[in-house]
Image (tube, coloured by chain):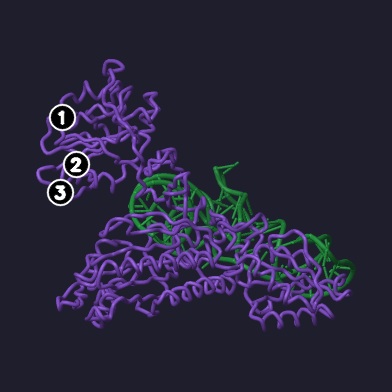
Amino acid sequence: MKWSQSLIPTQKEIPTDAQIISHQLMLRAGLIRQVTAGAYDFLPLGLRALNKAAQIVRQEMDRAGCAEVQLPILQPLELWQKTGRDVAYGENLFKFKDRHGRLTTIAPTAEEVVTELVAGTISSYKQLPLILYQIGTKFRDEYRPRFGLLRVREFLMKDAYSFHSNLAQLDEAYESLYAAYERIFQRCGVPYVVVEAEAGPIGGSASHEFMTPCDAGEDVLLFSDKNNYAANVEKAETGHRSHDLGGAPTGELEKAHTPDLPSIDEVGKFMKVKSKNMLKTLVFQAQGNPTRWVMGVVRGDHDINEAKIKKAAREKFGVESLALVDTPEVRSLWPIGFVSPRGAIGRNHTVILVDPDAAQGGFWATGADEIDYHIKHFNWQRELGAVLNDAEKFAVADIRNAQSGDPSPKNDGGVLQSSRGIEIGHVFKLGTKYTVPLGAMFTDETGREQPIIMGTYGIGVGRILLAAVETGHDDKGIIWPSAIAPYQVVITPIKYEGQAREVADQLHDQLNAVEIDCILDDRDARPGFKFADADLIGFPVRITLGERGLKEGQVEIKKRTQAEAQLVPVAQVVQFVQDLLLQHG
RNA sequence: CGGGGUGUAGCUCAGCUUGGUAGAGCGCGUGCUUUGGGAGCACGAAGUCGCAGGUUCGAAUCCUGUCACCCCGACCA
């Protein structure tokens, strides 16, 4: 490919709207261009990188025994209503009415459609397992698209769906795709870690996320410094934390007037109390019998984890579901924003769950159970008394998000560290969530009809690029892994004429002949200008043709990551570049 | 959806407070010089000042509305 025949609008200046480094570099390198919020043109170089990543995904999926299909983006809303996902997805689901008035979705994913396909074509255990996948554009009406390719409304995704007659078969597919994912990200040259994620309906280790650690990530991961545990913050457990509700009061209760202070931090600042010395009490509405309300108490600097408090409420009090609500009913019962654990006293159908770090003696400040007031010197024994010993009403449990510095759940002395990360892939054991409502059944060995068991597996192809750039760049520009670089080699003649032109053309053809893709910078521009563009775009290898070397029959070759070039005789260039590209992915 | 911000040339921005000929740098075109890390000089082209109303003799500038984009929050692959 000749540079002048492509469309590569590089730019020196940093676009104002780009916040994160990958977004800035991809715009500056002329890979992408924003059309509207969360939707991008992929220009020739960007598309080449995207296609390369997609092709690696395709090869590894095929290798793992998956069959490629293409499912429609236009799907009847009716199908989504059958599984309740029209509601679950809510506003994120693009939908419109067609000319006949039919409600149609512009789909973000294809569980319903693929399940229906399988329901209509699979009927016996003999036809299972089956894994179908597709690589295609998906749509989500994101509330707030942002950060370049990170959160977009239109994106290329590989989605795969596995179908099984029993759990062992599902486990096998899960392991196989997990391994395929590792190969994919390794081949793409993108750093990643695998973390446990929200387990979903099957429980156990039924869901893993593949994350690229980097500051731009929107997710928070925690991992043990003993390298034997990693999870996302929604899922991360903490090791044993002791608690002690004893301890003498630190003083008489002291009331403070605290109006118009919407956050714990502000109340703390106003009262001159650190937020770690405050108790935060949230009231959840429960669908339990007889429990109707669950109060969760954590330290002011901690965050309640909804999944954890749900689990604890189920285990300790048999509560079935929980929701944090702000309704007139709650507000009639509690002064929301000024609630203390005392709010549970004498209240029917109300239980209280306290995080171990909050279940301690010492000095506490908290709400005064009265609008616009907080109190200091809260003491568990004095304020709650007998309630603390009432196992039907009070329990201590891990109900907060794990954070850096917490003990590892392996309880082996490991300490959790945290990092931000970009989710680039997700594997998930689904169970029968879709097959039951959509009637995807099979007949088992004994002749009985059963719902098919499913798994679902996604990879954000665009996010692979983003993760590669986010983790591979320097002050000059992108440093592509060669597997997904738009071109592996750039040929830069100092002047594209005479002998340099002949040799450049010849090398270009020779490299192409051995399937090394290269771009020839044939522009009539000054060398510094071309070098800067080459560095900005980040081609892994640059071949420079100048008079000096050519006189000796030599060209200069350097990797993007090297400062100095090596002189290589023209006849040996192809071999040399092949070796260079093999050196590391 | 709440809070904040920005819309002026392809890009980055100034001008707006205090209404009166629309600007700079980069990029683009032409010419000359230059040619191994984003060249120099000269000349030139290029903007419905997001859009719609209003105020005014006169609006990029003041007022009202509206749209788009960005950031924080919430939400989430």
Q: What residue is pinned by disc 3?
A: A287
Q: Is residue A18 above or below residue A497?
A: above
Q: Quadrant of the C terminus of chain A?
A: bottom right
**Percent position (x, y) of residue A215?**
51, 50
Residue at the image position 36 percent from the left and 66 percent from the top: A174
Q: Chain of mark 3?
A: A
In the rendered picture, chain B carries what hue? green
Residue at the image position 40 percent from the left and 68 percent from the top: A177
Toward which corner of the image does residue A533 lie, by quadrant? bottom right
Q: Is residue A12 above or below residue A275?
A: below
Residue type at tag 1: Ile
In the rendered picture, chain A carries what hue? purple
Disc 3, SS: loop
Q: What residue is pinned by disc 1?
A: A345
In the image: residue A242, left or right of residue A585? left
**Percent position (x, y) of residue A395?**
21, 35
**Disc 3/disc 1 C-alpha distance (Å):** 20 Å
Q: Closer to the N terminus: mark 3 or mark 2?
A: 3
Q: Chain of mark 2?
A: A
Residue at the image position 55 percent from the left and 57 percent from the top: A470
Toward which corner of the image does residue A553 lie, by quadrant? bottom right
**Disc 3/disc 2 C-alpha distance (Å):** 14 Å
Residue type at tag 2: Lys
Q: Closer to the N terminus: mark 2 or mark 1?
A: 2
Q: What residue is pinned by disc 2?
A: A316
User: Is any atom of residue A329 visible in this view?
Assistant: no
